[in-house]
Image: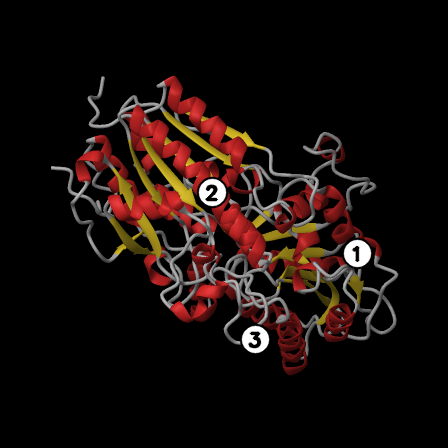
Amino acid sequence: MTDLRRKPVVLIVRDGWGQNPDPQWDKANAIVQADTPVADELMQKYPNVLIHTSGEDVGLPEGVMGNSEVGHQNIGAGRIVDQEVMRITRAIREGSFFENKVVNAAVDHVKETGGTLHLLGLMSDGRVHSDITHADAFIRVAKDAGLGHDRLAIHAITDGRDTSPTGGAAFVDSVQQKCQELGAGHIASVIGRFYAMDRDFRWDRVQQAYDMLTKGTEKTADSAVDAIRDYYDNPTEPSRSGDEFITATTIPYNGKPSLIGPGDAVVFMNYRGDRPRELTKAFVLDDDVWSQIQGGGFDRGEKIDNLYFATMAGYETGLPVNVIFEKPPKMPNILGEYVSKLGLKQFRCAETEKYPHVTFFFNDYRDEPFDGQNNEMAQSPRDVSTYDQKPEMSAPEVTQIVLKEIESGRSDMIIVNYANGDMVGHTGNLDAAVKAVETVDDGVGQLVKATLAKGGSLVVTADHGNCEQMTNPETGGPHTAHTTFDVPLIVVDPDSVGKSLREGGRLADIAPTVLALMGLEKPADMTGESLVDVN
């Protein structure tokens, strides 16, 4: 049996909890405005440091904000992980994208059937789920294939979470301009990501996107820009006033809707897997599988015949789609695997919104848990449409689950995520974000007390920032996106009191730090370095 320095070692990810370096924004900083006695005491008593969570430090382009998927993958890997956006952009720049077999097969399919090529995706420069510049490459593909304006239909999903809530009109206008410039493609529909990119089995939302794409909508507009601006003027309710909530709108081309049907090809250009899955499944699952879908699905009718469906990246193992950019080989000796190989027990917990992050993404896109890994999920609230209406979310349930696990003494390593700072931060509601932060602080306090009582240690940190900047510095309106600010990392370890942590760290250094607290050497594959010296 491996002799451990501390048991358990608990890693707490306070999702979206960054440190805003500019005091002029203190009034818009939910963390500063909140009452956080636990965080205050931990920062005063235990060694802490700021770590990097964005740009090249996490495998993203310089200056690009981090996100939960990227963050948890980097944390779990113990090394910087090059992200899909880098590989895809490089392939486009170097030209190999235009020779991609799946891209060309989609074009060949519609040439053979006489059908339409449909480009579906989040049209923004947030670069969390997609990159709008990739749409330009597909328009160029359509032009080179001679599809013209009529046979490339672009279905724009608007953002407003990873970008300004009112940036959508400019984004779709840039796509429309590229269509005019290259002589190919038209925008056929617009819908907010609230509907098209659900990930919590709210199938009533997904159905609105599916029906728009396959049947059209009563609501129409002369252009995508008109559709978006009309929604700004007439939101469905005051709390749903931005791009995220744009209602399904058909943009007729030559007087007719451009619908997805038999003989067509669809390319879903999102490269992050968690949010496109549900809508993708509605198109690609056979009728017998669809009828058994988790959460009940919706009445989609029969599966569309002879539809070629491609996705920019792999969204889920076993999903019957054509993948343009397959995932690279699994990384060896990531944190979960390494701990498992040593015969140790580990436990993962989060609520629904972040459960894939502490399991699937943390394990480098592995669906199955490692030997000795147990997971438990708390259901995120289903009785609210946005989490500012219930800023505590399911944090109390997460806390109780983890307290029970700590008390049991079963696990050597525990990974827990509190979603509130990020999910409520995305709403742009400062008062709600303050309550979210206070809820998380209370939960962290309970876990710290229980862990120390068991002789364990903790690492308290975040995957990226969000709720520390709730006002957009440029517009003065709500800020709903992540930030590029550093995040605090606190080592709550009795033997480390009075010590200093290494400066200049990044998410890749968290796994080696956890292993050091456990008294374990890091594997050679982990290029991150421990932030704490336990000797």
Q: CA distance from mark 3 to mark 2?
A: 29 Å
Q: Which residue is mark 2?
A: 440
Compare marks 3 and 1 and give the one earlier in the sequence.
1
Q: Position of residue 90 (x, y in %)?
A: 42, 65
What residue occupies the far bottom of the structure in this picture?
Answer: 181
Amino acid type, residue under disc 1 in the picture? Met
Foreground tag (3 vs 2): 2
Q: Which mark is residue 475?
A: 3
Disc 3 is placed on an element classified as loop
Q: CA distance from mark 3 to mark 1?
A: 32 Å
Q: Position of residue 114 (x, y in %)?
A: 77, 61
Closest to the observer, 131 or 191: 191
Horizontal placement of 492 versus 215: left or right? left
Mark 2 burial class by Cα count in 10 Å: few <14, some 14-19, many 20+: many
Amino acid type, residue under disc 2 in the picture? Val
Mark 3 burial class by Cα count in 10 Å: few <14, some 14-19, many 20+: few
Task: Give the residue displayed 25% in from the left and 41% down from the top.
Answer: 513
Compare marks 3 and 2 and give the one earlier in the sequence.
2
Disc 2 is placed on an element classified as helix
Query: Do the residues under discs 3 and 1 have CB atoms within 8 angstroms?
Result: no
Task: Give the residue displayed 44% in from the left and 55% down from the top.
Answer: 31
Q: Which residue is mark 1?
A: 212
Q: Quadrant of the C terminus?
A: top left
Q: Position of residue 397 (x, y in %)?
A: 54, 31
